[in-house]
């Protein structure tokens, strides 16, 4: 009875009471929300601390039972090439990192110098089977880097030496600064491997003209880097100079040359570390200037003229005239034609001595040239 009354009373007073409870109830909700948020933040910050310590602090404070500590703290950290070419550095960070140079010149480990073959291509490398034969049996003496358009997805099998050799890339266009940026990006990625001593820039239409041993020796023994650089007084040379480049670049210092270079480590660092000429070329060597024909030749001729051979080692045929050199397809590839290339330009200086070996690569070869090239390579090019 009593309880019924009280329940009735409760019912009657419900409205009034619930109004009086509104305040404490909201307070409780807020409290719960704060508790929840607080917990959430502490969980997040626990993860953050863990993340940052793993990456930055812990290697020095962790105990030795974790294998990664050994890996990070011994010499391997500095001399082993990165296990993957994928990284998240932007160009500014990458060029900075790549410009590191040891001041002690003796390597405290057995360093086998390698040649970095850097392929600059839009997409596929149709002549890759020829290159695979060229590289066969020379593991440890070369490394491969490929810069293709970011949208391109390579299809190399895991067994291929080109598998996962693509570096993080960006769109690059011929004749524009983005082309030089792609070349610097290739150089910078290749510089991260301390064993790379020579850096060769190639396109998808390039072929090797000799076997690996000959080319490796030719590069390793060269005193000079092979960067084409000459003073062309005509409209396509000095005619492209812009006076706004002074005083960094004076017209008498303006040089022209093919973009396909081969440089040693010293000159490669000169290219990636440049912050003096880059803004000038970026601003004042616009489209019709063809910056990829002028930036490296001019900048290097000012900074390190004594280190340059002033010639390219990549054969090309301009004899047909026009804005582009000749491209050779299946029908062009004959024994006589290849012999002609090998004999061509047999008149140059190598280490200040007259030499008959002047070109060790050639361009431009169409995908259809692959079959005859594979056929003639063993007899005429000395590999395969
Ligand atoms: C490379 O070619 C040279 C000259 O033709 C030859 O003497 C040498 O044996 C070749 N090397 C290899 C590894 O085939
Ligand atoms: C360019 O450099 C040359 C030689 O260093 C000098 O003689 C000439 O006066 C310079 N020209 C200009 C426009 O500064
Ligand atoms: C290349 O040209 C520069 C001038 O730009 C010169 O100082 C250097 O000696 C030349 N290199 C060779 C190997 O002749």
Image: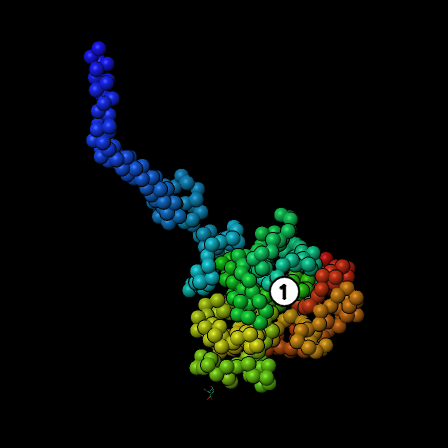
Image coordinates of residue 103 in percent, x first then y, are 42, 64
| Horizontal side of residue 110 vs 74, given as left or right | right
The answer to whether 165 is drawn above or below residue 103 in the figure is above
| Residue occupying the point 65% across, 77% down | 348
The answer to whether residue 111 is seen in the rendering is no
Q: Position of residue 178 (x, y in %)?
A: 53, 67
Q: Check disc 1: other Cα within 10 Å, few if <14, some if 14-19, many if 20+.
A: some
Query: Residue 142's image quarter?
Result: bottom right
Q: Secondary structure at mark 1?
A: strand
Residue 356 on image: x %, y %: 68, 75
- What residue is rendered at 51% in x and 57% in y? 193
* Disc 1: residue Cβ within 8 A of ligand 1's nearest atom: no
Image position, residue 310 (x, y; %): 58, 77
In this rendering, the count of numbered labels is: 1
Q: Which residue is mark 1?
A: 203
Location of residue 26 by image quarter? top left
Residue nearest the observer in this picture, 23 or 200: 23
Please state if 334 lies on the left or on the right of 280 as rendered: right
- Left/right placement of residue 119 relative to residue 30 reads right
User: Where does the C terminus fall, quadrant-wise?
Assistant: bottom right
Can you see residue 177? yes
Q: Where is 66 relative to 202, above or below?
A: above
Colour pattern: rainbow
Q: Quadrant of the N terminus?
A: top left
What residue is rendered at 55% in x and 67% in y? 179
Instruction: Out of 21 and 123, give the one closest to the viewer.
Output: 21
Does 61 sit above or below residue 376? above
């Amino acid at each position: 009875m009593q309880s019924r009354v009280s329940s009735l009373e409760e019912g009657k007073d419900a409205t009034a009471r619930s109004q009086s409870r509104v305040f404490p109830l909201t307070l409780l909700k807020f409290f719960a929300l704060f508790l929840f948020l607080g917990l959430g933040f502490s969980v997040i910050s626990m993860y953050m601390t863990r993340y940052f310590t793993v990456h930055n602090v812990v290697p020095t404070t962790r105990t030795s039972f974790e294998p990664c500590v050994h890996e990070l703290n011994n010499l391997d950290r500095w001399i082993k090439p990165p296990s993957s070419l994928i990284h998240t550095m932007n160009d500014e960070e990458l060029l900075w990192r790549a410009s590191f140079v040891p001041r002690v010149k003796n390597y405290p480990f057995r360093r086998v110098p390698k040649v970095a073959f850097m392929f600059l291509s839009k997409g596929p490398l149709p002549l890759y089977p020829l290159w695979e034969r060229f590289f066969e049996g020379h593991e440890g003496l070369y490394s491969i880097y490929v810069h293709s358009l970011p949208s391109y997805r390579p299809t190399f099998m895991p067994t291929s030496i080109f598998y996962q050799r693509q570096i993080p890339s960006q769109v690059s266009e011929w004749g524009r600064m983005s082309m030089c940026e792609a070349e610097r990006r290739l150089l910078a990625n290749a510089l991260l491997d301390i064993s790379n001593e020579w850096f060769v820039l190639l396109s998808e239409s390039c072929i090797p003209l000799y076997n690996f041993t000959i080319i490796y020796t030719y590069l390793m023994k060269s005193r000079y880097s092979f960067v084409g650089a000459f003073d062309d007084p005509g409209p396509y040379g000095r005619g492209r100079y812009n006076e706004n480049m002074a005083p960094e670049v004076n017209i008498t210092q303006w040089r022209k040359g093919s973009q396909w270079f081969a440089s040693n480590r010293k000159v490669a660092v000169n290219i990636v570390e440049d912050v003096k000429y880059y803004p000038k070329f970026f601003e004042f060597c616009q489209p019709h200037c063809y910056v990829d024909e002028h930036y490296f030749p001019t900048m290097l001729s000012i900074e390190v003229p004594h280190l340059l051979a002033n010639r390219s080692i990549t054969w090309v045929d301009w004899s047909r005239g026009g804005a582009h050199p000749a491209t050779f397809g299946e029908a062009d590839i004959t024994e006589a034609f290849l012999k002609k290339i090998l004999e061509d330009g047999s008149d140059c200086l190598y280490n200040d001595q007259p030499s008959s070996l002047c070109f060790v690569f050639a361009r431009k070869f169409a995908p259809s040239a692959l079959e005859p090239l594979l056929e003639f390579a063993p007899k005429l090019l000395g590999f395969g």
